[in-house]
Image: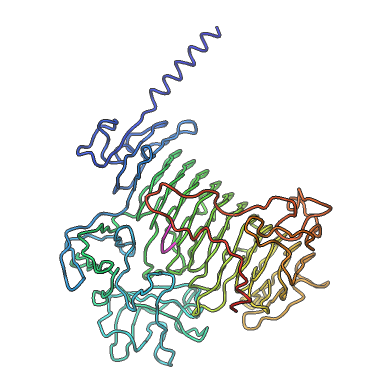
Amino acid sequence: MKKNYQFLFLLFAIAFNVTAKEYHVDCTNKSLGNGSVSNPFKTISQAAAIMVKGDVCYIHKGTYRENIVPKNSGTASKPILFTSFENDIVIVSATDQVSGWEKYSGNIYKKSGVNLGLGDGNNVFFNSKKMQLARWPNDTDNDEYTLDAKYIDMTKGTYSMSYISNNEIPNIDWTGGTIHYLGAHSGCSWERTITNYEKDLNRIHFETLPDRWPFGDTHSPTRTENGHRGIFYLMNKLEALDAPKEWYYDTQKKELYLYAPEGKNPNNDLVEVTARVNTSEITRDYIHFNKLNFFGGMITIKGNHNEITNCMVKHGSDKLITNLSGAALSDAAIQILNGSNNTIEKCVLESGTVNGIIVSKDAEDNRIENNIIQYFNTIGIHAQLLNSSGARNKILKNSFYGSARDGVKVTGDDSEFGYNHVQKCLISGADGGLFYVTGRSIPVNVEVHHNWFHDAYGAKHAGKKAVGIYLDNNAAGYIVHHNVVWDIEWGGLHLNWNAVKNEIYNNTFWNVGHAEQALIDSWVPKRDGVQTNVAENTLYNNISDVRPWWHSGDGTKYRVDEKEFEGTEADNDFKNNVQFSTLPFSIEKNTLFMPLKDSPIIDKANKIKKITDGFIGAAPDLGAYEFGGKAWTAGVDWTPEGFAWIPGNDYEKLEFINKAKSKR
C-alpha cells in the first residue's frame, strides 16, 4: 500500500512539472515566435497574456518598450515569475525612441511628427539621462534640487495672488508657458500656466491662486519670510531653448526640439521620450518580478502577494505639477494602490520629481525591505522617498537619500518603520522632517525604532527649518525608540497642535541646531478660537547635547515652556532624559554611537516593558545603544551589482560632523 502512495505522489509531481511551463522572450526575434527557447516570443506581453500558475518567463537581453500586464494569477506554491535569462540585462521601458533629427538652428535639432501625449508626464531622455524642459534662468549646475531661480520683486504693487514681477525676465512672449514658484515659507512649490506677459512691467500673470492652503497666505507672493516673497523660474517656451540639455515640444505642430548635451547631434545617440505611464500594472495575485530593470514609468500594483525583488526602477515618477490643486501627487516609481502581502525587496529606485514608493491606505500588510531609494521629490511638493498610509505595513532596513522636502511618511495603523537610514532631505524646501507625519489626535500605534536620521539643512531661501523627527499637527500614537538623530538645524523632535499620546524612549539626539535651538519644539496656536495643546506624551531615557529641552509657542513667539515637561502642572511625562557636554558614545565607524567604556549613560535608564528588554548590566543604558550589546546598523546590507545602470552611492554616506556648531 505504501508503494502505491509513493507511485501516486510521483505521478502528481510529474504532472505538476508538465503543467508548469517555461517561456522565453527575445526582442531581437524577427517574428512573434512561439515562446520556446529556439523561437522566443518577441514581447513580454505575449507571455503575460497566457502564463498561468507556476509558469516562468525568461526574458533575454534587450529593451522592451511595453507595459507588462499579467492576465492571470499564480498561487502561493506556484507563483508566476518574470525574470531575466541568466545574467542578461533586461530593460522594460515606458519610452519610445526618437530618431531622424534635423538641424533647426545652431545646436538645436528638430523632429516632426512626434506624438507626446502625457502632458505633465512628457519627458525627454538622452542616453538614459533626463533632459530639462526649456527654461529661464537656465539650470546651470544640472542639479534639480538647487532650483537656480530668481527672487520676485517685493515692491508693493508688483506682486499679488495672480502675478509676479522681476526686471530680469527676458523679453519674449511667455503666454502659454509655465511658472514654477516656491514661496518664502518654502513648504510647498506650485506651477501655473502663464496667462499673460506684460513686457513693459516685466510681469507674469497666471490664474488667481485659491484662498486656501496650500496657497492662500502660506505659499503665495503675499507672504514675506526669510527676507523675500518667493523664488521662481519660467519654462516651456521655444524662445527659452538656449542651453544644452534643454527641450521643447510644440503640441499643435507635434514638433520636438532638443539642444543635446555638449551641442551633440542627437542622431548619434539614444534619444527617448515618454510614451506610457506604466512599465507594469499588476492587478493579479502571486506575480513575481526578479532581476529586471524598469525605465521611464511606474510599476503599479493592485493585487496580493506580489513580489518585486532585485530590480531597478529609474525615472519612474518624473512629471510636472502644472495647475495642481493641492500639495501632493500620488504618482510614484512603485505604487501599491490596494492589496495585501506584497513585497518590494533588494531593489534600487532612483530619480523622480515626485514620490519613490507609495503604499496607499487600501494597501495593508505589505513589506518594503532592504531597498535603496534615492533622489526623489526634486520638484518640492509634499512628496516623499516613501509614503505608507495602509495598516500593518513593515518598512525595514532601507536606505533613503535625497528629497527637496520630507524624507519618509508612515501613518498607517500598527505599522513598523525600523532599521532604516534616512538622510539629506529638506534640500530646497522647509518646515518638514526626515520623518514627517500628521494625524487626527487618534493614536495609530506606529513603531519607529532603530533608525538613523541625519543631515537636514535647508537652503538659504528656505530658512533654517529642517527637523529630524517631525510629529506635526495632531500626530498621535507613535512609539519612537532607539533612533539616532544628528546634524539637524531645527531640532531633533517637533510636536505640534494637539499631538498626544506619543511615546519617545531611548533615543540619541546630537547636533540638532545652534546652541539655543531646543531639542523639542511645539507649535500650539489657537485654532477656531480653541487653544491647542501638546499633551499626554511620554519621554524617557533620551540623551542629547546641551541645549534647551523644549520650546513652545503660538507661531509668533517661542518660549522656554517648563509646563510642557516639568513640575506638577506638566502636560507631558518627561523623566530620566539627560544632556551631556561631551560625547558619551563612540564615533568610530564600527562602533558608531555605542557607549564608551565608563560612559555616564551606562546602566542609567529606566526599565520599560518591551522597549528595554534584554538589557545588559544592572539596568538599561540611556540613549539608542546598549554597552556590550549589538552595534546595530541601519540601512541596506548589500551592494547593488548587475543592473542596467550604476546606482549613485550617496545612500552609503555616513558622517558624524558637528555642523550645528561649525556652520551655524
Side (left or right) of 165 relative to 108: right
Q: Position of residue 465 (x, y in %)?
A: 57, 75
> Which residue: 65% across, 71% down?
511
- Which range of residues does the magenta coloring cover? 350-354
Counting labels gives 0
Which secondary structure class fits the magenta region best? Answer: strand
Q: Position of residue 232 (x, y in %)?
A: 39, 79
Say above or below: 134 vs 648.
below
Task: Examine the structure image and report whether residue 256 is included in the region drawn in magenta.
Answer: no
> Which residue: 53% across, 63% down?
407
| The C terminus lies in quadrant | bottom right
Q: Position of residue 512 (x, y in %)?
A: 64, 71
Say above or below: 490 vs 340.
below
Q: Using the rendered view, name the quadrant where residue 268 is placed.
A: bottom left
Q: Using the rendered view, name the quadrant where residue 38 is placed.
A: top left
Q: Is residue 497 visible?
A: no
> Which residue: 69% across, 76% down?
551
Please tell me which residue lies in front, 663 or 395. Answer: 663
Q: Position of residue 116 (x, y in %)?
A: 25, 61
